[in-house]
Amino acid sequence: MKSRTKVALALVAAFGLGGAAVGGLHAQAKAKAIYVVGEIDVTNLDAYTKEYTPKAQALIKKYGGQRLAGGQDVKSYQGTPPAGRVTIQRWDSEEQYMKYRNSAEFKENRDVGDKYAKFRTYSVGALN
């Protein structure tokens, strides 16, 4: 085999290995899931559950979030628990959650929710 052919084959192999390595690094850099915790102090439970909650739950599902837990049955093992409702959602990434949160549908529904409750929302990154 000629030297030029060997060099050309070596270059092609090197580019292929480099591409595979970059692909592997991109896969490792995949965004981590986040868990969004909401603490909700409801002032009008009937209106909140009829006008806000069904749409909020549908939007979470539509945008790819998962509702893991929610309600007023909060048990404390240490310290004072939140006084109102608590929700926990799982999102594949913060980017996915922010698409949901910045959507016109979310903002419109949150305007309804704000009439009947005060919200405190934060996230915790997954350990994966």
Image (cartoon, helix red, strand yellow):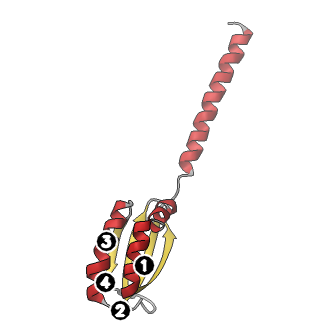
Which mark, by number, is residue 43?
2
Check if mark 2's residue and mark 1's residue have beta carbons within 8 Å.
no
Q: Earlier in the sequence, mark 2 or mark 3?
A: 2
Which amino acid type is shown beneath numbered disc 2?
Thr
Q: Which of marks 2 and 4 is nearer the N terminus?
A: 2
Which amino acid type is shown beneath numbered disc 1?
Gly
Q: Is residue 2 above or below residue 46?
A: above
Question: Distance of mark 2 from mark 4, alpha carbons?
Answer: 8 Å
Check if mark 2's residue and mark 4's residue have beta carbons within 8 Å.
yes
Residue at mark 3:
55
Q: Which of the two marks, 3 or 1, is nearer to us in this view?
A: 3
Q: How crowded is mark 3: few (under 14 residues within 10 Å), some or many (20 or more)?
A: some
Q: Residue furthest top?
A: 1
Q: Where is residue 112 in the image (x, y as percent from the top left)?
A: 37, 80
Q: Where is residue 65 in the image (x, y as percent from the top left)?
A: 38, 63
Q: Circle 4 sits in a helix, a strand or a loop, which is it?
A: helix
Which amino acid type is shown beneath numbered disc 4?
Tyr
Q: How crowded is mark 1: few (under 14 residues within 10 Å), some or many (20 or more)?
A: some
Which amino acid type is shown beneath numbered disc 3?
Lys
Question: Distance of mark 4 from mark 1, alpha carbons?
Answer: 15 Å
Question: Distance of mark 2 from mark 1, alpha carbons?
Answer: 16 Å
Q: In this view, does 24 lie above or below 7?
A: below
Check if mark 2's residue and mark 3's residue have beta carbons within 8 Å.
no
Residue at mark 1:
38
Which mark, by number, is residue 101?
none
Question: Distance of mark 4 from mark 3, alpha carbons?
Answer: 11 Å
Residue 109 picture quarter: bottom left
Question: Distance of mark 2 from mark 3, alpha carbons?
Answer: 18 Å
Which mark, by number, is residue 48?
4
Q: Count the marks: how many?
A: 4
Q: Is residue 7 above or below residue 68?
A: above
